[in-house]
Amino acid sequence: MSILVTGGAGYIGSHMTLELRDAGHDVVVLDNLSTGFRWAVPEDVPLIVGDFGDDELVADLLSRYDIDAIIHFAAKIVVPESVADPLGYYLNNTAKARALLANAVAGGVKHFIFSSTAAVYGDPDDNPVTEDESLKPVSPYGRSKLMVEQMLEDTAKAHDLAYVVLRYFNVAGADPQGRSGQSTPNATHLIKVAVQAALGLRDKLQVFGTDYPTPDGTCVRDYIQVTDLARAHLDALRHLRAGGKSLTCNCGYARGFSVLEVIETVKKVSGVDFPVEIAGRRPGDPAAIVAGNERIKSVLGWTPRYDDLEVIVRQALEWERRLRERQDKGAFAKG
């Protein structure tokens, strides 16, 4: 039996592919390479270039590779972009996920792990936020993900399908072995942007809002290291294959850092005092959101290994240096 990883050539998906292969699983990647990279998929892992909403393609590969589990990462993920293009997000993140689910049911797939987001909580009343918090997303991105969660719940009740929904908080860092990292040139992740500013790849870093009701006025987020996140999916897969029930879990460290704290950490680790510009708030950004993580630890047995902001920043910095060196040599061509 094989595991299908949609979006497996992207940032989080490529780390998932590496972890699955390292654990001895048979893996197949489906990615349209719009934001992913062919080189991010190991040569011994089949890569199908295509869209996860393509019914004929997906039905064929589910049968051809004897897929029993799908780990679904492929999605648009930029909150301000979703505010400007809600229909594009509902098409890609929701409508196409519905098509993928229908193919999973028709193809006899028993297990489904979904990459969701803390954005389903909106601006929570309390932090750390638990999975029982009311769901009130404030952006089309968050709503597009919540709709898929709801579809999964209804589908599992009607068919022989069990799922785990993992609600990510802010993903950062890189593979400790240096095999993959955040490679999208115009990524909006704070640590990625700050590291690029430290290396002179951006002329400045913008802080979007300093008037939030937080200790220093900037947004507070829970930053989870990407390999820790990938291993949470492995725990979810073991749970499902052992007959575990459908489940929704937060993925985070239960500790938040403000934008200014992250910037200071990047400056400390890099040794560079790069320029910072204060700008207005962005639409769709909650003031603070930190993960309550008792459920994922107690039910899935997840144990973080890289819960240290300086370690995460150092990984991101080392990956960015490696990425630029290899791009200069032509080793990291797009696609």
Image (tube, rainbow, N blue to C red):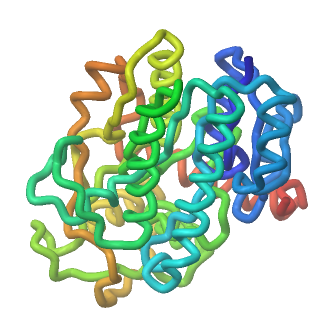
Q: Quadrant of residue 276?
A: bottom left
Give the side of residue 275 with respect to residue 330, left or right: left
- Looking at the image, residue 310 lies above or below residue 247: below
Q: What residue is shown at x 39% (from left), y 40% (from top)?
A: 153
- Pick the residue in front: 186 or 24: 24
Q: Residue 18 in the image: x percent, y percent?
A: 68, 31
Q: What residue is shown at x 31% (from left), y 28% (from top)?
A: 296
Give the side of residue 70 with respect to residue 234, left or right: right
- Farthest residue to the bottom: give it: 280
- Looking at the image, residue 71 lies above or below residue 122: above
- Looking at the image, residue 320 lies above or below residue 291: below
Q: Quadrant of residue 292?
A: top left
- Farthest residue to the front: give it: 158
Q: What residue is shown at x 85% (from left), y 59% (from top)?
A: 335
Q: Residue 82 in the image: x percent, y percent?
A: 48, 76
Give the side of residue 294 with respect to residue 53, left or right: left
- Looking at the image, residue 193 lies above or below residue 242: below
